[in-house]
Image (tube, rainbow, N blue to C red):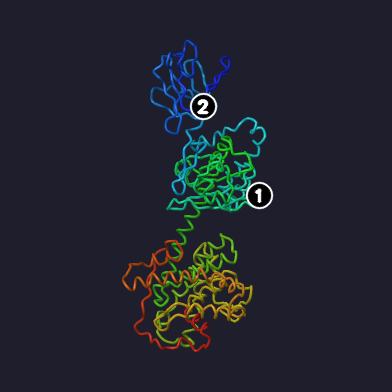
Amino acid sequence: MDSPNLVLAAPAPISRTWASATQLRIGRLPDLEVVIDDWSISRRHAEVVLAEEEWVVRDFGSTNGTHLNGVRIGRTPQRVRQGDLVRVGNIELRVAHLRGRPSVVRIGNGQAVQVEAAAGRTWDEAVDGFAPSDDRWQRDGKGFLRLMRAGYRLAHSMSPDEHLQRVLDEAVVFFGAQRGGIFLADHPSAQLAVRCVAIAPGASGVGRVLSKTPAVRAFAGRQSLLFKDCQGAPELNAAESVALGSMASIVCAVLRSPDRAFGVIHLDRGPFQAPFTEADLYLADSLAAALALGVERIQMVDRQQELFLHTVTALAQAVEMRDLYTGDHTHRVTTYSMLLAEELGIPADQRQLLRAAAALHDVGKIAIDDQILRKPGRLSEAEFAQMKTHVTRGAEIIQMVPGLAWALPVVRGHHERWDGTGYPDRLGGEDIPLPARVVAVADAFDAMTSDRPYRPGMSVVAAFAELQAGSGKQFDPQCVAGFVRVRPQIEALLDQESVFRQRAETATDTVTARELRRSMTGVTPLPAPEAVPHPGRDPASPLSSVDSPLTTVVERLG
């Protein structure tokens, strides 16, 4: 016999329950599944039936009617949920247990895994009622309320990402999971990406790899799902992410507001733990609803930062439109800076600020005379002195824009030197702000490796040699060492850029500046102007009177 997916319970004086996997017909006829001998019940009164993947109730045209939660219904099927009250005539029945028909999730190679249960509640229903079993509520109710309150506070947190991580850590402990994760939908692609991961205390050997397939299935259907026995399903256990993670039972609760869904909470247990129950599913579903406003705020902040970065990029590109030699210099410096910052372990929130500051590092050049900025030949001492003022003029511009103070150390300090002989403030060592030290290395590397109409760029080998020669003199030794460690990524980016340019030059493909920048970072910034060769530049003209090729390039191009 199929396991019961629906249980209807009648209180005293009847005190009976009826169970079925597909259908319960109610009336006085003896061939029905629910036979109730009461004068208010018609011979064929109503039925509760599984239609597709949800249970519905409908009336058969009874004399005294069928009511769902106090509202009379007709022959049109009405969806029922666990805990609903169905009154037939004068008899009241409670939906004591309910789950839909087990569905399947398709994974790689067309394989499938069964969904044990689904919670298709609205946001209001999830927040108002989480329907735990009585014994669990007595044992864990206070802990769950504390977790729910933490979710509500997420919307008002000054550090939402940190608060979200703490909530996930607590959820893993409360649900007895070995691991948890939060997937958020990228904007505007709506593709799920891992935002944070938590491992239970003492869960040795549990990796941070999450199976994305169940989360995608839950998100696509806008239903929280329970996968009760993943290890017992060879088709899912064969998936590498499950096999490596030893995930035997999974709950995926959809993060949603009343208007839309924007992510998934993933919780999993190992093969030596008891599988999650439907009570766990409904609790996780309620937690997901409680987190909704806070997570929505995180995404709103992300979108604001993205819009701000586009604005900053547009401001930086105004400089490149005037300095025709530098091409995509600003964009490449930003890309290199982010690689180095991540290698150095700079926190994510500070990297976001660094990303915008790096884009603005040469904004002061907008105040430099065109005759100097575009001069095809060697700069005089007076001209070079004016070129050096781009850092102080940039700082003045930044100070005039409310909310950009955090970019000031990079804009003003990216030409300071580790040995204290740089400009404008002759700072040295760790007195130079770390973001400025990071950008200084990225800026110098791009200046050396970029082609100019008046000279070819250095080879990558030569440029890295110059950086290492300047370590401890011009550059922070730790920044140089970190930059050397990310050399494979940098070379891969340069190779990819070279391929794009070669295709464009040979007319074998069409490439835009936007596509070129996407190839380097995976994001789509605002379009930037292409570099335009200056017809008056003498290719043999010396760059500067300074002998060091590194100093020459960096000081001439900024």
Task: Give the residue type at disc 2.
Answer: Met
Q: Residue at x 64, y 52 (%)?
A: 205
Q: Helix, strand or loop at disc 1?
A: loop
Q: Residues within 10 Å of mark 1 (few under 14, many from 20)?
A: few
Closer to the chain start, of discs 1 and 2, is: 2
Q: Quadrant of residue 12?
A: top right
Task: Give the residue type at disc 1.
Answer: Ala
Q: Residue at x 44, y 50 (%)?
A: 190
Q: How far across and down, in percent of the image, does residue 440 sit?
A: 54, 74
Q: Is residue 171 visible?
A: no
Relative placement, left or right, of 249 versus 367 is right
Q: Residue at x 36, y 79 (%)?
A: 533
Q: Is residue 222 visible?
A: yes
Q: How far across and down, in percent of the image, does residue 303 sit?
A: 47, 55
Relative placement, left or right, of 449 versus 135 is left
Q: Which residue is mark 2?
A: 1
Q: Which residue is mark 1?
A: 203
Q: Residue furthest top?
A: 39
Q: How far across and down, in percent of the image, does residue 523 sit?
A: 44, 61
**CB contact under 8 Å: marks 1 and 2:** no
